[in-house]
Image (cartoon, rainbow, N blue to C red):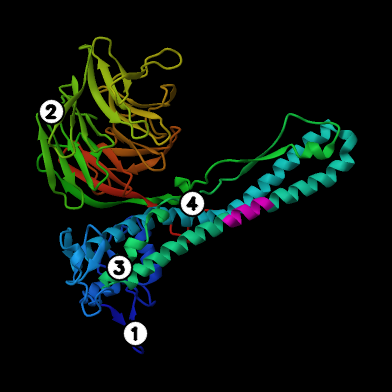
């Protein structure tokens, strides 16, 4: 798309509005003003687009900059050993590792823009949402402080009725002082966030001013470190008031000094203030996997690719291009359920012949047998790697006893926990087919036998039963298949009987049918995977070899974030 020009003063304007254009999106070929660029980089559908300052689109010839040591020469090369540009007369770099100046400039500029982009995608967005919430926190927390101190006033009044006339004046002083100090604290936090945003914006402006000035850019990135931008400033979350038990009845002033203000820790932005459910899911694309007959399970690699498996093989699929990157055969799993998972090093852990777990390295060069079942009566049904505890969760089934259990193993292979019975001593699992973990540590298991109703069993991390989800308000029973959880701690489950995907909250309450068979891309959904990096849902079908990619969660716009 060519830039649009204003009729009077020949100023390039934004493709979306009438403001002056500053940046260009190479992915969707749009010119963007500062505000539209901010919206473009916040939206989850476009945050990974290639957006640069407009002058870089024009591919200007870099200016030849004069060497500081040899004014008659210009910089032509870059020394990787010394991290500095040099000219042909600079002999001290003769035996060092060197690069062409233009190559060094483009490589390092790309690296820094990737880092800046990540900071703006995540850290800066979270800080801006946090700052928007400070206003309501000042109002709400100040009110809470007053209410807590008033509660303490009542307690003190009952204990010291003889000193009420002294208490009234002292309490008013303490309330006003505590409220004033807390409001000052929150204003200080707001200033810290503003200062951090200003520093990052100034750094970005310096980067933009060095476009096509390789030497200035390389000197800038050598002098300024990104480390000071990467950590969120430490912001106390707030304070709690309490009354010391050591009460001196002789002196009311000493009594009031026993009121303590305690730090509640670092202020955090809740996911509910960053993300929202959309009014309806949107199908983004459909991926066809030529090496597979159907989709029984999906494991997300969190780098734009997923492992997908049926009963005979698994394949690594690139989501943007739909290309098959790798195909792995020779690891049959007769049950075809949640048979593989990715660990924190992106290695594939896969059940082999229901009897062992094989680890396949990310580079596909090595295979290691990491777990072998000890009792042949128990078959391995499903497996899940916990990113919070780094433990391996394995679902087992005993055909003779017709019961299942969940085993938790440490990274060293030590059995930590066996989860099998509820608090009343009753078995919780028939056949555990799919296994995952929620953000709060709850263990979520899809349980069923063929041609029978099933349920989703949820326990806490210690194995205490929390609830079993068996149907929605409109259904008589559930035939569950694949499950997953999302960034808002929802639980999603495929229902084979109705060909729908249920959305329930972390406490087991049915919220809605997120996906139904009337939607495009839904054909007997069988397995699910949520991509926490891009916030997309991948849905696999049992009837064909297609994966449908949906978005149903997006970010709040900065002017629409909740208080």
**In what element is the residue under mark 4?**
loop
Label 2, label 1: how far apart the Cα atoms are: 63 Å
Tag nearer the camera, 4 or 2: 4
Q: Say few, some or many: other residues with alpha carbon within 10 Å of mark 2 (under 14 / 14 to 19 / 20 or more).
A: some
Q: 480 or 185, which lies in front? A: 185
Label 2, label 3: how far apart the Cα atoms are: 51 Å
Dot 3 corresponds to which residue?
217
Q: Residue at x 20, y 64 (%)?
A: 92
Q: Is residue 61 visible?
A: yes
Question: Which numbered disc, 2 or 1, marks the residue that appears first in the sequence?
Answer: 1
Q: 216 or 446, which lies in front? A: 216
Q: Which mark is residue 331?
A: 2
Label 3, label 4: how far apart the Cα atoms are: 27 Å
Q: Quadrant of residue 244?
A: top right
Q: Quadrant of residue 505?
A: top left
Dot 4 corresponds to which residue?
233
Q: Specify the quadrant that holds the N terminus.
A: bottom left
Question: Which numbered disc, 3 or 4, marks the residue that appears first in the sequence?
Answer: 3
Question: Which numbered disc, 4 or 1, marks the residue that appears first in the sequence?
Answer: 1
Label 4, label 2: how far apart the Cα atoms are: 48 Å
Q: Say few, some or many: other residues with alpha carbon within 10 Å of mark 1 (under 14 / 14 to 19 / 20 or more).
A: few
Q: 219 or 121, which lies in front? A: 219
Q: Which residues are magenta?
A: 181-188
Is residue 213 positioned above or below 432 on the image?
below
Dot 1 corresponds to which residue?
6
Query: Looking at the image, do the residues carrying marks 3 and 1 touch, with CB atoms under 8 Å apart?
Result: no
Q: Is residue 448 visible?
A: no
């Amino acid at each position: 798309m060519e830039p649009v020009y204003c009729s009077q003063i020949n100023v390039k304007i934004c493709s979306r509005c009438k403001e002056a254009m500053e940046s260009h999106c190479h992915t969707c070929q749009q010119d963007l003003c500062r505000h539209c660029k901010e919206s473009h980089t916040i939206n989850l559908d476009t945050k990974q687009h290639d957006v640069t300052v407009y002058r870089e689109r024009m591919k200007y010839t870099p200016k030849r900059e004069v060497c500081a040591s040899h004014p008659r020469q210009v910089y032509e090369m870059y020394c990787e050993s010394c991290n500095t540009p040099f000219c042909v007369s600079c002999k001290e770099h003769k035996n060092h590792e060197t690069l062409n100046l233009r190559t060094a400039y483009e490589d390092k500029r790309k690296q820094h823009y990737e880092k800046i982009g990540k900071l703006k995608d995540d850290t800066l967005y979270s800080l801006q949402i946090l700052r928007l919430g400070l206003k309501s926190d000042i109002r709400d927390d100040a009110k809470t402080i007053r209410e807590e101190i008033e509660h303490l006033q009542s307690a003190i009044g009952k204990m010291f009725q003889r000193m009420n006339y002294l208490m009234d004046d002292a309490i008013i002083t303490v309330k006003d002082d505590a409220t004033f100090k807390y409001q000052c604290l929150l204003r200080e936090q707001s200033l810290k966030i503003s200062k951090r945003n200003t520093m990052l914006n100034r750094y970005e402006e310096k980067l933009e001013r060095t476009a096509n000035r390789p030497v200035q850019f390389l000197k800038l990135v050598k002098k300024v470190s990104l480390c000071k931008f990467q950590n969120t400033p430490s912001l106390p979350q707030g304070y709690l008031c309490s009354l010391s038990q050591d009460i001196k009845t002789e002196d009311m002033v000493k009594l009031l000094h026993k009121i303590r203000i305690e730090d509640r820790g670092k202020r955090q932005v809740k996911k509910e203030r960053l993300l929202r459910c959309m009014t309806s899911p949107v199908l983004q694309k459909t991926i066809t996997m030529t090496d597979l007959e159907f989709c029984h399970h999906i494991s997300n690699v969190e780098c734009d690719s997923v492992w997908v498996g049926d009963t005979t093989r698994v394949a690594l699929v690139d989501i943007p291009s739909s290309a098959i990157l790798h195909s792995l055969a020779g690891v049959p799993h007769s049950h075809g359920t949640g048979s593989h998972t990715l660990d924190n090093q992106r290695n594939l852990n896969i059940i082999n012949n229901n009897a062992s777990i094989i680890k396949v390295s990310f580079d596909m060069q090595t295979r290691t047998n990491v777990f072998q079942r000890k009792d042949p009566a128990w078959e391995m049904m499903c497996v899940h790697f916990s990113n919070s505890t780094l433990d391996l969760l394995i679902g087992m089934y005993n055909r003779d006893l017709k019961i299942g259990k969940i085993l938790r193993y440490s990274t060293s292979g030590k059995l930590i926990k066996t989860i099998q019975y509820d608090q009343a001593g009753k078995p919780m699992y028939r056949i555990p087919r799919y296994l995952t973990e929620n953000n709060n540590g709850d263990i979520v298991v899809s349980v069923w036998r063929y041609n029978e109703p099933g349920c989703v069993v949820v326990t806490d991390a210690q194995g205490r039963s929390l609830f079993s989800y068996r149907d929605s308000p409109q259904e008589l029973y559930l035939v569950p298949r694949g499950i997953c959880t999302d960034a808002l701690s929802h639980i999603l489950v495929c229902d084979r009987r109705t060909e729908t995907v249920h959305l329930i909250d972390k406490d087991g309450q049915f919220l809605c049918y997120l996906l139904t068979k009337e939607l495009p891309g839904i054909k007997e959904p069988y397995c699910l995977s949520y991509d926490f990096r891009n916030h997309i849902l991948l849905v696999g079908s049992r009837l064909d070899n297609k994966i449908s990619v949906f978005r149903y969660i997006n970010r709040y716009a900065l002017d629409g974030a909740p208080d």
